[in-house]
Amino acid sequence: MNQILIPNNDWDSNLYEKHAFVWQYGEDLLKLLNPKPGESILDLGCGTGQLTEKIALAGAEVIGIDNAPTMIEKARQNYRHLHFEVADACNFQLQQPFDAVFSNATLHWVKPADAAIASVHQALKSGGRFVAEFGGKGNVEAIVKALHTALAEINIPAQSLNPWYFPSIGEYANLLEQQGFDVNYAIIFPRPTPLAEGEAGIKNWIEMFAGSFLAGLSSEQQIQVTHTVEKLLKPTLYHEGIWTADYRRIRIFAIKV
Ligand code: BEZ
């Protein structure tokens, strides 16, 4: 495999493993993948490997890739018997085409969606399936709005700090069709997601996932922005000691024509 390392992609794999909902919800997507013994499957954006292992337990030959070296190091520690590589979703090359590409909670990090779809397409056998779930249009909208408001209060425009791609079904299905996929199934649905660690839930979520909004701020400013976000969101997203993030997922099942 050709690997493209992404510098500065220094995810904290220990903090990530405290957000177990990322792969716990992904188990539902595995049913749509329906991996079978002997199939070759690529897990695109495998994180620390929990779903890669489930695919392997179904008897498939699986490779997990992720662009974060820290995640791959942890995945290799977690599952020594499995194969993991550092690679970029937009630019990976594999020696053999796969029966399926699976991707959970990754593609909202990949703004050049057409490049990622092209890489998936070339990685699949003809008739191979692409099964993915990620944030869709309107995902974490209340959180994003609160971050924008909090940053505006200290005169920082947030537009260019947003790291995410949250497409509508129409937009994403169109990209898939343009690149030679038949879209058999596509759905967008709200999935309110309770966060762990009680009152600290939203602060920890921001630290883990929304760090790019805070990069470049002093630590005092980071605390101020986080407090403002908590204050703005508390009436709607915090109930009985639990924060719930306003996730909306897009889920697709497409076949390489
Ligand atoms: C998501 O899984 O939808 C998500 C995760 C982190 C940041 C934004 C969205």
Image: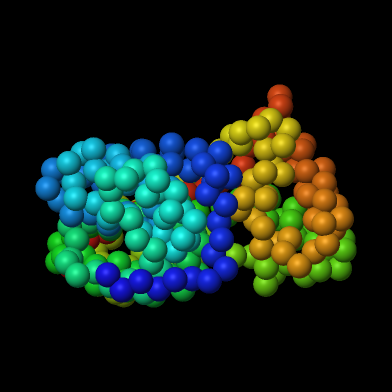
Q: Residue 14 versus residue 223: which sits nearer the camera?
A: 14
Q: Residue at x 82, y 43 (%)?
A: 231
Looking at the picture, how far across and down is residue 32, in whole percent?
Answer: 28, 44
What is the basis of the colouring in this image?
A: rainbow
Q: Residue at x 56, y 39 (%)?
A: 18
Q: Does 198 sit left or right of 104 as displayed?
A: right
Q: Does 81 sit left or right of 152 as displayed?
A: left
Say if 244 sits above or below 140 in the image: above
Q: Residue furthest top?
A: 240
Q: Name which quarter of the figure residue 5 lies in.
A: bottom left
Q: Quadrant of the C terminus?
A: bottom left
Q: Residue at x 59, y 65 (%)?
A: 163
Q: Does 214 sit left or right of 65 as displayed?
A: right
Q: Quadrant of the N terminus?
A: bottom left
The answer to whether any part of residue 256 appears in the image is no
Q: Does 72 sit left or right of 219 as displayed?
A: left
Q: Residue 156 versus residue 137: which sits nearer the camera?
A: 156
